[in-house]
Image: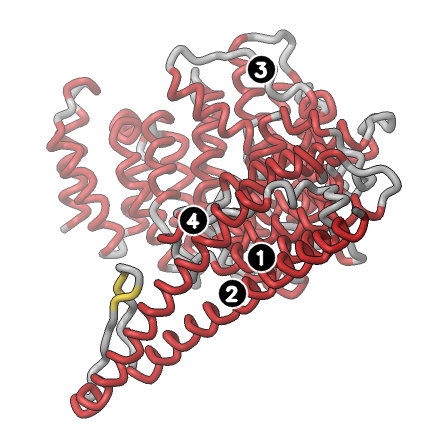
Amino acid sequence: MAVEELQSIIKRCQILEEQDFKEEDFGLFQIAGQRCLEEGHITQLLEIIQNEKNKVIFKTMGWNLVGPVVRCLLWNDKEDDKRKDYYQMLDLLVKLCNPKELLLGLLELIEEPSGKQISQIILLLLQPLQTVIQKLPNNKAYSVGLALSTLWSQLSLLPVPYSKEQIQTDDYGLCQCCKALIGFTKPFVEEVIDAKENSVENEKLKDELLKFPLLTAQFLEQSEEGENDPLKFFAAEIIGFLSAIGHPFPKMIFNHGRKKKTWNYLEFEEEEDKQLADSMASLAYLVFVQGISIDQLPMVLSPSYLLQFNMGHIEVFLQRTEESVFSKGLELLENGLLRIEDNSLLYQYLEIKSFLTVPQGLVKVMTLCPIETLRKKGLAMLQLYINKLDSQGKYTLFRCLLNTSNHSGVEAFIIQNIKNQIDMSFKKTQNDKWFTGPQLISLLDLVLSLPEGAETDLLLNSDRIMASLNLLRYLIIKDNENDNQTGVWTELGKIENNFLKPLHTGLNMSKAHYEAEIKNSQENSQAIQKSKDLCSITVGGEKMPNMPPEMQLQVLHSALFTFDLIESVLARVEELIEIKTKSTSEENTGIK
């Protein structure tokens, strides 16, 4: 029945010109063809496609059958005879159909699946896709770029194999797809190489191949097995392609950012720039971290120049939220910093935007990344970065992060680093002007203060407050009032008014509030236990999550313990100030 329906539609269309085909003809053709496949009339359908009289009809309408044929191939992955017929049918449709319509149809099919079917359909359609693009009379460069972008957006959804065992099993087919992509790209690379003249279309094709993304491929660490890693082989092949099309990667990565603008529309230009930035960052990672073709780089480049060059790429990585991507930024940063001696990176580098945005990106990794190892790696990289800066650079960075981090733990980390720099200055024969005297006082104004005075949320800011108190205690102990190398004694009145007194007031208010909440919670606990309900309370104007009364009491007591700890350090600081002031006064009296 389905075969007769299809033949009837075809017979009616045979007497029409191509431009006279109606929309309903397309719909009936697709339905009848799909029913032929569902009912198993494969041989008859093949004969209809092969009939020379139907050539024009299948050129115009045949692309509608590609989707059903592809689905049959995916469903019948074990029936060899049928699969052979389906493959033959797919090949015929690729040869007969309008390449422009077929290109869009194939890309839609590639975008449809999820999970393990992503690699299955890509491996199935790469060869037909390559054939269709090669048949296009014009706009080949745009079509290559569109295809590569579509393919990679799907492949980036697949989990990346990390271990040798995962790569060998290749459960999701990512390694197979990367290998197949090399074969897909090769004829277009050869077309650029073989071109006798640099036409506009040829240059566009070069640009599309240059943007070929390598962003989410992870690679094994350098090891004996590394040579057999298909992902690393894939990356090396792509770099080889880039050199072959006239973009030797040393010239390409060092000239990045000087490219002429080609779009009249800003949104197109911005998207192109983003894709190119992603590709260049990936290339830098492959070269400097994985060591692929690094022997092609000039050996005269200084470590600070290489770091400056790579900071823009590191910034690109750290702006992304995928762990497998921004971890590359951490590795690339580490690679650059380890080449540089401590305290040798000049403060002028911080005038370059990326030298400030990268540490701010590290702060985001440290505070927002859900993976503990990466958070710790971010912290280690920030410390390493601080170590490499000269004194003025450290000073500038500390001010920047204190003003922008908005995170108590990060601020405490910075304050600890300030303390370390002051300590080093004390041990030098000549004081460091950035961590003594007026410059230090300017920095201490940021540190020894409460963001909102007595109204500051002391629990939320407890890490910062404890670090500030410990720094002040250190300064009082280490710096005598008569020497006053740090200037802290001159500023003691301001410190008391801006920090110590508001902190006293805030502690009294916070402790009273939490003690009242504990009392209310204890009074209500018996009634709540009888009803076996969860309860909630409001602390600092915010409602705490529902939890059992015992847990809420534990949280409240923990807060009180934090306040007691802050109060004890505050008391010790004030005691030290009194002792040192009294001692200095007595010494001065004795001298007189």
Q: Which residue is mark 2?
A: 566
Location of mark 4 (residue): 121
Q: Are marks 3 and 4 in contact (CB under 8 Å)?
A: no
Q: What's the residue at 14%, 43% (across, down)?
A: 5
Question: In the image as oriented, which residue stretches furthest toward the front?
Answer: 592
Residue at the spot of label 3 = 259
Q: Amino acid at mark 1?
A: Leu
| Cα–Cα span, label 3 and label 4 | 36 Å
284 sits to left or right of 453 = right
Mark 1 vs mark 4: give the one in front: 1
Assess whether mark 1 and mark 2 are in contact (beta carbons under 8 angstroms). Answer: yes
> Which residue position holds label 1?
469
Identity, as a three-letter code, of the amino acid under mark 4? Ile
Image quadrant in which you'd find residue 438: top right
Counting residues from the start of the chain, the first of labels 3 and 4 encountered is 4
Nearer the N terminus, badge 3 or badge 2?
3
The kind of secondary structure element at disc 3 is loop
Residue at 52% in and 59% down: 463
Q: Earlier in the sequence, mark 1 or mark 4?
A: 4
The answer to whether marks 1 and 4 mark residues whose Cβ atoms lie closer than 8 Å is no
Mark 2–mark 4 distance (CA, rounded to whole Å): 61 Å
Instruction: Using the numbered discs, state the Cα–Cα distance from disc 2 to disc 1 in whole angstroms.
Output: 8 Å
Q: Say if 30 sits above or below 146 in the image.
A: below
Give the total number of marks visible in the rendering: 4
Name the amino acid, label 3: Lys
Q: CA distance from mark 3 to mark 2?
A: 56 Å
The image quarter in which residue 81 lies: bottom left
428 lies left or right of 504? right
Q: What amino acid does circle 2 point to? A: Ile
